[in-house]
Image (cartoon, rainbow, N blue to C red):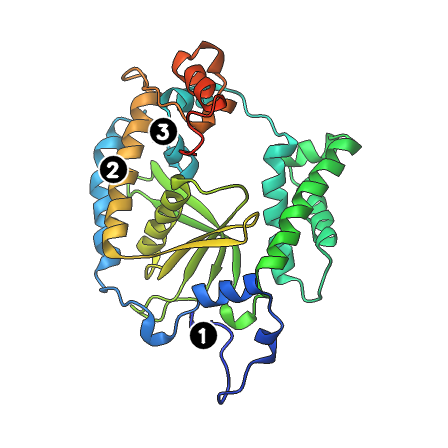
Amino acid sequence: MTDAGASPGPEAAGRPNPARARLNPAQQEVLDQLGAARGERPEFPAELRGRLRQALDDGLAPLVEDLDTEDTLFVNKHALGSVFGCERRFVALEDAPFEWTVPIARGTVAHKAIEILVHWRRKPHPLTVVDEAIDRLAEGTDGLGDFLKRCTETERAELRAEANDRVVKFTECFPRLEPAWRPVTESRLRYEHPSGRLILAGKVDLTLGQPDGPLAGKVLIDLKTGGFSPIHREDLRFYALIEATRTTPPRLVATYYLDQGKLMAEAVTEDLLDSAAARTIDGSERIIDLRRGGRQPSVSPGPACRWCPVLPDCHPGRGYLDEDASGGLGDEW
């Protein structure tokens, strides 16, 4: 990615690049899968940006009319993923008070640490940037800052250990990001309906490269632990859509699974962006409808039943988990 998202780690005059020779197999695979020569990058029509904006403007306009006069709806990947999962769980989580815990905070701390790591001019130890991330976040005036200030030493040690695990895996799996690749961490994306009352928002873990006019060059990357879920692909398509309404679409979206050292990438196309726009409009309509109590929420049992607040009163959810525990659903998930 020497310029605007071109192939990373180029070789000069046919000689092997010493930096590439020091890469482990996982790091080399990242370069091979994310890199693309200029001639391999797609070119999108100049009118695509305006067409996608218009599609969202028109598709969301009737939904805005259903909002309360003073209400503004924020739609993010989590809301869309939840409402397309189990609607009853979505409603329950909407009503449940949010509380920071170590499992919830560890992802935010790890992402902050990776942000510091990428932009640190020296070569720091992972625990150094984890401690720096915790200290920085503890200075905040939000709920996470309050949690970090009042958590016990045991909770802080547990948080430190779990965030460090993620940062170490990132350093093991990703090559050091060169400035020429234009790395950006925690990149915020936003689309705002002309009414100002419906906002699509996202934050990408890592972006590399940049567009060159209509020639796509940017790669959007989400970092995950655990295993694959179809929703991860939909999350990135949502990000690609918002990016395409802002400037040239990215050429690639990718989820990197740190526990597995595995990258799953998808090329961005006009069809992908149109599909993402339709899904976003549909999901926004469902969110508004359920928040207004327009209908009974549907129930869709799945792995998330394990953490659902209404599980004790949900017969389909309990039945799903009983069958899963007996091995009946092991191959599906």
Question: Mark 1: few, some, or many residues within 10 Å (few <14, many ≥20)?
Answer: some
Report the quarter where the C terminus lies.
top left
Number of labels in the image equals 3
Instruction: Tell me if residue 300 can be seen.
Output: yes
Q: Residue at x 57, y 47 (%)?
A: 259
Give the numbered dot on residue 83: 3
Instruction: Tell me if residue 139 can be seen.
Output: no
Residue 281 image position (x, y, % from top left):
26, 37
Residue 84 image position (x, y, % from top left):
34, 31
Question: Mark 3: few, some, or many residues within 10 Å (few <14, many ≥20)?
Answer: many
Residue 98 image position (x, y, % from top left):
55, 25
> Splitting the image into 4 quarters, where does residue 46 fall?
bottom left
| Secondary structure type for disc 1 | loop
Do callouts 2 and 1 mark residues in contact (Cβ within 8 Å)?
Answer: no
In-image side of 25 versus 44 (left or right): right
Q: Amino acid at mark 3?
A: Val
Q: Residue at x 40, y 30 (%)?
A: 82
> Splitting the image into 4 quarters, where does residue 41 fall?
bottom left
Q: Amino acid at mark 2?
A: Leu
| Disc 1/disc 3 C-alpha distance (Å) | 39 Å
Give the numbered dot on residue 60: 2
Looking at the image, tell me whether mark 1 or mark 3 is earlier in sequence order.
1
In-image side of 249 versus 117 (left or right): left
Question: Mark 2: few, some, or many residues within 10 Å (few <14, many ≥20)?
Answer: many
| Disc 2/disc 1 C-alpha distance (Å) | 37 Å
| Secondary structure type for disc 2 | helix
Q: Amino acid at mark 1?
A: Asp
| Disc 2/disc 3 C-alpha distance (Å) | 17 Å
Give the numbered dot on residue 3: 1
